[in-house]
Image (spheres, rainbow, N blue to C red):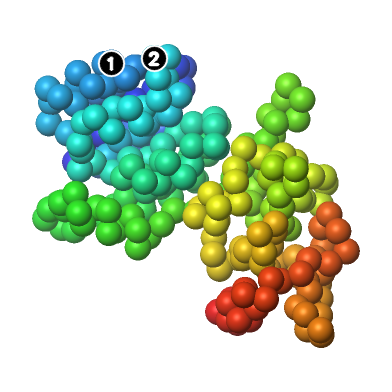
Amino acid sequence: MIKTVIIEDEKPASRKLERMLSEFADIELVAKIESVEEGLEWFSANEHPQLIFSDIVLGDGLSFDIFEKVRTKAFIIYTTAFDQYTLKAFKLNSIDYLLKPILDEDLAAAVEKFKSFIPSDNSVNSQEIKQLIKKEKSTLSRILVKIGYNLKIVQTPEVSCFFSENKIVYLQTQERTYPSDFTLDELEEVLDEKKFFRVNRQFIINSDYIKNIHTSPTYKVELEFQPQEEITVSRERVKDFKDWLVS
């Protein structure tokens, strides 16, 4: 059995996730934790599980505070309504990052990813975990954006490009432009590198939306749904850009 812990301060969300996990015959829930304080106490006094499902924003702080103070060999799947913590999550034994509301298929995929990391004898040390996570780095599949007082989930495959303007990073879709809480440097770490490429200091583009590439006198890319007519590939990135196009 896969011993599992849920860290979630919202009882309805905790109960829903517990119900969803009950569909997996090989998962055993051993504890439900509601705060940073409770988490520190529990992990200090109990045998650690193999897998943790953890919300990030708790009533008395961030769940990161637990794992920065208590070393654990457990794999962590973060479950949250906030996307701005993605990069830090990936640095703390995270193998996936599920945005609420959690979809059945996303949860199933995350559990299968966890199982793919575990050898038959269940012997994985902390250094091996870090290497496995680095090798199988999770990518950002959805982004939560604010529209006034409302929130909207944007699937990253729908984004033609991310661009920086006046110190704010925006994402462009067929519908419109949305501001995000990421920096372009952070996005480079969590986007699918087979699909997205940083062409210059201002733009990350999605290969699926490239319409034309002009090679003379400099490389310029024309995309569908982009905020300007052409995007210039910086000189130092041209070779990498050409390699990326055929990779």
Which residue is pictured at 45% across the width and 34% down the height? 79
Q: Nearer the viewer, residue 53 or 243?
A: 243
Residue 235: x percent and y percent? 67, 76
> Which numbered circle lies on residue 60?
2
Q: Residues within 10 Å of mark 1 (few under 14, many from 20)?
A: some
Q: Amino acid at mark 2?
A: Asp
Residue 139: x percent and y percent? 49, 54
Q: Nearer the viewer, residue 186 or 123?
A: 186
Residue 78: x percent and y percent? 41, 37
Q: Residues within 10 Å of mark 2 (few under 14, many from 20)?
A: few
Which residue is pictured at 49% across the width and 37% down the height? 85
Specify the farthest residue to the bottom.
Answer: 216
| Location of residue 31 with respect to 202 vertically, above or below | above
Residue ID for mark 1: 37
Choose top left, top right, bottom left or bottom right for residue 27: top left
User: Circle 2 — which element?
Assistant: loop
User: Circle 1 — which element?
Assistant: helix
| Location of residue 137 with respect to 29 vertically, above or below | below
Would residue 25 be visible to someone looking at this image? no
Q: Is residue 200 left or right of residue 81?
A: right
Which residue is pictured at 70% across the width and 31% down the height? 146
Residue 210: x percent and y percent? 76, 70
Q: Earlier in the sequence, mark 2 or mark 1?
A: 1
Q: Amino acid at mark 1?
A: Glu
Q: Nearer the viewer, residue 55 or 16?
A: 55
| Location of residue 61 with respect to 178 vertically, above or below | above
Q: Is residue 135 left or right of residue 142?
A: left
Would residue 137 be visible to someone looking at this image? yes
Q: Is residue 141 left or right of residue 225?
A: left
